[in-house]
């Protein structure tokens, strides 16, 4: 009896291993079908939670939120009120010093010539002879011409400073790689302008 059970168990084991090794025989997993159970109307169905769409990556050329800006009209107004103020606003410190120095020089020249004109007027009024009067009158007109020259140069430097600040505000933190780098090369025998694209 024990030998018959052992033989039967051995035959079942061999038959099962042959069924697994033979691809022509259908496997148990191929024959199993999961039945679809109808959902009762009074039961709650599990719903999937909608997933928010992924944000599109920002384009490499769109750097408007990362690049700091300067307002051109503010830069121009600062240059008009304070010499070199627009250049300080756009972080052009060397230009700020140059414009402030130039406008200050022309302003001081205007003030000096204006004082000289007033002095010549007082001297002409107190002149005792016609020769002294004519001398002081000629000096007055010379100082008047010098004062007007300083005035026009000062106004020109101020306007140029305002225009420069306006352009600098537009070009503030501009990507240098997008524009050619222009350099001036000077040697003892030549002067050349080179551009790197």
Image (cartoon, rainbow, N blue to C red):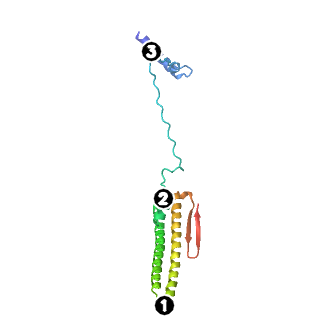
The residue lying at 53 percent from left, 49 percent from top is 62
Q: Which residue is mark 2?
A: 74
How far from the left and from the top, in percent, is residue 27?
Answer: 52, 20
State whether residue 13 appears in this view.
yes
Q: Residue pushed farthest left?
A: 2
Secondary structure beneath label 3: helix
Check whether the beta carbons of the residues at disc 3 and disc 1 lie within 8 A of each other. Answer: no
> Rounded to the nearest whole Å, what is the CA distance between mark 2 and mark 1?
56 Å
> Rounded to the nearest whole Å, what is the CA distance between mark 3 and mark 2?
97 Å
* Mark 2 or mark 1, earlier in chain: 2
> Rounded to the nearest whole Å, what is the CA distance between mark 3 and mark 1?
152 Å
The residue lying at 48 percent from left, 69 percent from top is 99
| Relative depth, front residue between 5 and 55 | 55
State whether residue 18 appears in this view.
no
How far from the left and from the top, in percent, is residue 175?
Answer: 53, 57
* Mark 3 or mark 2, earlier in chain: 3
Q: Is residue 26 above or below residue 192?
A: above
Q: Which residue is mark 1?
A: 129
Quarter the C terminus occupies: bottom right
Q: Dot 2: within a 10 Å radius of its alpha carbon, few (fewer than 14), some, or many (20 or more) residues?
A: some
Disc 3 versus disc 2: nearer the observer: 2
Q: Is residue 88 above or below residue 112?
A: above
Q: Which mark is residue 9?
A: 3
């Amino acid at each position: 009896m024990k030998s018959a059970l052992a033989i039967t168990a051995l035959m079942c084991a061999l038959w099962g291993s042959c069924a697994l090794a033979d691809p022509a025989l259908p496997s148990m997993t191929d024959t199993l079908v999961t039945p679809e159970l109808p959902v009762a109307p009074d039961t709650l169905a599990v719903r999937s939670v909608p997933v928010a769409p992924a944000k599109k990556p920002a384009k490499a050329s769109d750097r408007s939120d990362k690049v700091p800006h300067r307002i051109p009209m503010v830069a121009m107004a600062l240059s008009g009120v304070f010499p070199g103020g627009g250049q300080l606003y756009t972080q052009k410190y060397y230009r700020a010093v140059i414009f402030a120095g130039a406008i200050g020089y022309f302003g001081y020249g205007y003030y000096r010539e204006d004082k000289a004109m007033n002095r010549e007027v007082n001297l002409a009024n107190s002149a005792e002879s016609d020769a002294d009067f004519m001398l002081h009158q000629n000096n007055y007109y010379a100082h008047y011409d010098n004062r007007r020259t300083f005035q026009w140069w000062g106004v020109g430097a101020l306007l140029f400073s305002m225009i420069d600040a306006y352009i600098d505000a537009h070009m503030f933190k501009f990507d240098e790689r997008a524009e050619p780098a222009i350099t001036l090369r000077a040697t003892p025998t030549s002067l050349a302008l080179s551009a790197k694209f």
